[in-house]
Every structure is written in C-alpha cells, then in structure tokens.
Amino acid sequence: MSWTDERIERLTKMWEGGSTASQIADELGGVSRNAVIGKAHRLGLKARPSPVKANEKEEAAAKPAPAPKAAKPVEPKAAKIPSEPAPRAAPPPRAPAPVAQPAAGAAPSAPQQRIVSVGPGGFLRQGPGDQQAPIPPAPPRRLVPAKPSPEIADKTSLLDLNDRICRWPMGHPGEPDFHFCGEKVNPGFPYCVEHCGRAYQAQLPRGHRRPPPPLPFGGPRVR
C-alpha cells in the first residue's frame, strides 16, 4: 500500500502524540509495525526510547537499594615465633669390623680367578674397577717404494714408460715377468722399428688377399 500525503500526515500526528508503532499500524491499516517505524525514520521524526528499556529502568528504581553489609572486625593474628629445634646428640662412633684372620695351620686361600671378557677384534674389555695404562701412539709410517721383483728388476715396467721408449708389451699381464720393450722408438710411432714392422703391415693387392672364412651354419638366412 502506498504512502499518500494523508496517511503520512496522520502518521506524523499520531507519532508526535505518543502513540506506539503498533497502534499507528492498526489505525492506518495495510501496514506493519516495522513499516511504520521505517517510515518515521525516513521522515526524520524524533526517536522515542524503547518501552522495554523504560520498563526495566522503572522497575530498577522501584526496588529498594540493598543495605550495606557491616564490615567484620579483623582480629590481629599473633605472630608465630619459630621454636629452635633441640640440638641432636652426636651418634657414638662405630667400632671397626674385626678382620677375619686365617686360623693357625690353615693353608692360605688361593687367589680368585679373574674373568676377562674378550671383545671383537681380540681386545680385552675393562671392568668397572680396571684401569689400563695409556697406549703410546704408533710411530709415523715411512713410505718406502716397493722393490721390483727379481724377474723384472732390469726390465721396463709400466712406471718407466714415456714418449721416447717402445711400449710394445712383452708377455701376458698376469705373468710375473711381464714388461715392455723399452727400446728407442721409431720417430713418429709409439714402437721401435722392429715392433713397428709387426704392428703396421702393408695391405696386399686385392688379387693376393686370402678369401674370408665361411660364415657358420651356412651363412645368413635369405627370406
């Protein structure tokens, strides 16, 4: 329902006259209480205190104020004086325990056998009461070059190779007398003249070459 000038004027008079929003809504008809409050707020009408809070204030004013409680007198507490403990009497000294002495004519007891635990590696484990003397540090090790075996004492080994001597191996690497040639190299080659002739061979003419060996199992399969 729209707000006409007549309805707005009637709302303003009833609002200023002290009517509640519910009474104004019933009088106008077709509007709710919240709509009346919103319209009054938009028109800038003077706001009124909430009736709920007003009733609470009236009830609080009607209740008599509680009488103040009388303070209880505080009795002074007597200060406690710590009593000094009586001195304790010193305990009498204990007599030393008598040492058992072997009877006359008895054979001296054999020393008890000590059990020593051997740990991994063969070292002896110390007990709680054992104390081992400090182990002196080992002397510094001197690096001495290994002596060549008598089989290759005067022959060229792997450590003797350079660019000026022949590197042709003599023997099998697993044999004790395995060594290298050691002769003067052929200029431009890593071997001497003799071993160059064995390492580098001229290729024969095509007509003098030997035929290749036959392939195993009759050669490749033709599909």
Image (cartoon, grey):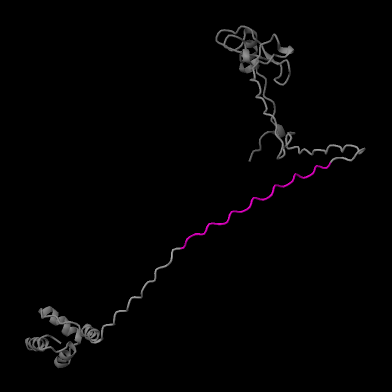
Name which quarter of the figure residue 123 lies in: top right
Which residue is found at the position 69% from the left and 30% from the top?
Answer: 215
**Where's residue 127, x and y in %?**
72, 39
**Where's residue 10, x and y in %?**
9, 89
**Where's residue 175, x and y in %?**
73, 19
Which residue is found at the position 12% from the left and 88% from the top?
Answer: 18
Viewport quadrant of the N terminus: bottom left
| Secondary structure mostly seen in the magenta stretch | loop
Viewport quadrant of the C terminus: top right
Name which quarter of the figure residue 57 lies in: bottom left
**Where's residue 133, x and y in %?**
69, 29
Residues in magenta, as a range: 80-100
Name which quarter of the figure residue 159 lies in: top right
124 shown above or below 183: below
Q: Nearer the viewer, residue 49 or 94?
A: 94
90 shown above or below 26: above
Q: Nearer the viewer, residue 13 or 8?
A: 13
**152 part of magenta stretch:** no
Q: Nearer the viewer, residue 82 or 118?
A: 82
